[in-house]
Image: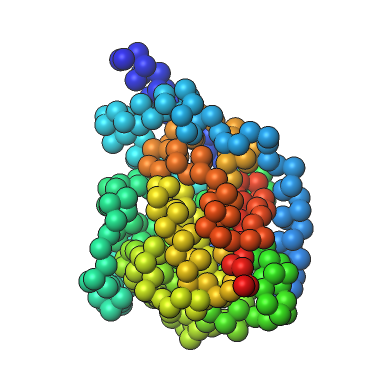
Amino acid sequence: AARRDARTMSTVASIALATPRAPSARSLARSSPAPSSSRGSLASRRADASSSSSSTSSLTTDKEKPDWAGDDFLSKVVDAAISNKLLYEGLMKPMARRTLINTAEKNGVAWRDIASALDADPAVKALYDEIRNEDVEYPSYYLQPFHAYSEGNLCWLAAFEAEPATYAMALRVYPKDRITAEEAQRRLRDSYTSALRSHVERYSPGAAAEPELIVDVGCSVGISTRYISDAFPTARMIGMDLSPYMLAVAKRADEGKPGSERREWRHCLGEDTKMEDGSVDVVSLAFVIHECPEYATRALLTEAARILKPGGTFVMTDNNPKSAVIQNLPPALFTLMKSTEPHSNEYYTIDIEGMLTEIGFEHVHTEQTDPRHRTVLASKPKK
């Protein structure tokens, strides 16, 4: 056992060598990212996203999932290492944080400065009191440690670091491209909204009609909400999340932004939104389902079906189990990733398309929207 732990520690320690390194000239040329959704016309951004999406079509494999997830032997070995408290607390958790922070800061994202500025802003904590719904009962799966935070998303540090963490994630999608963190984020989000736009125009009642109400479930600090809002500039948006910390940061960041008058932030369960039946045109879950056990995923999809209007659209984006990049991650990286995502085994083995069909959706299909991620779309029958 001691030899096994030593080998695992050696493997995980190699993460330092696996972290992408940008040329110094590129790093020096970068500055902290500004909101990118205002850059360029919507038409040009959709064209870019469409081109990017089509170029990813060959980046999947015939395998249904990576070997390091599910019940495979490799997955069980990784899980055993993660269950070792000494390894997890002493090595994996701090190393996972360092990997994200290093990726961000080497590429011009001022991770620590962004978090410190939010921490020093009294308006953020005032918004927490305004947004928090005392009637919310947190499900047990949401109270687990994840993302290398002992309190999960129910803490200020997770909320303050969420924005730079998303830029680090976006940069890792395009490790060989000489692009800024802002451009990486724009590509990531526009590929999603472009797929959504195409589905809405093809399958919604009156193909040219714009959605009136869009709900972004698990909106975190509102990045996905604002990108979707910009893509559908006449729609009213509701960003929902279980973390009042995240929502306080989302609302503060949204103040004064174009279209902020159309956006609302709600502290509630995505599985029990309290919204009326058939009242919503689009339900979105961006990078949410990998954080949920299977029963919660089913509940989220069932609730989406309930609140959607006939002909309404469901859309989710998340890691693609068939992605060649995801399936061939180095051992250090997939070990660290699993160590911060307690529901990985379930996520990578869930048949999302099958579940949507079983719940009653139609026109269910998956798009590989970037080298790592898929977007799954479906429509509620028009009746």
Q: Residue at x 68, y 36 (%)?
A: 61
Question: Can see residue 98?
Answer: no
Q: Quadrant of the C terminus?
A: bottom right
Q: Quadrant of the N terminus?
A: top left
**Up/down of 266 relative to 74, above or below:** below
The image quadrant that residue 328 belongs to is top right
Query: Is 303 placed left or right of 365 in the picture?
Result: left
Q: Residue at x 76, y 66 (%)?
A: 47
**Up/down of 308 relative to 94, above or below:** below
The image quadrant that residue 6 belongs to is top left
87 and 303: which is toward the camera: 303
Q: How is the image coloured?
A: rainbow
x, y percent for residue 20: 56, 40
x, y percent for residue 108: 53, 56
x, y percent for residue 254: 45, 77
Q: Residue at x 42, y 26 (%)?
A: 76
Name the residue furthest bottom: 261
Q: Residue at x 35, y 47 (%)?
A: 146
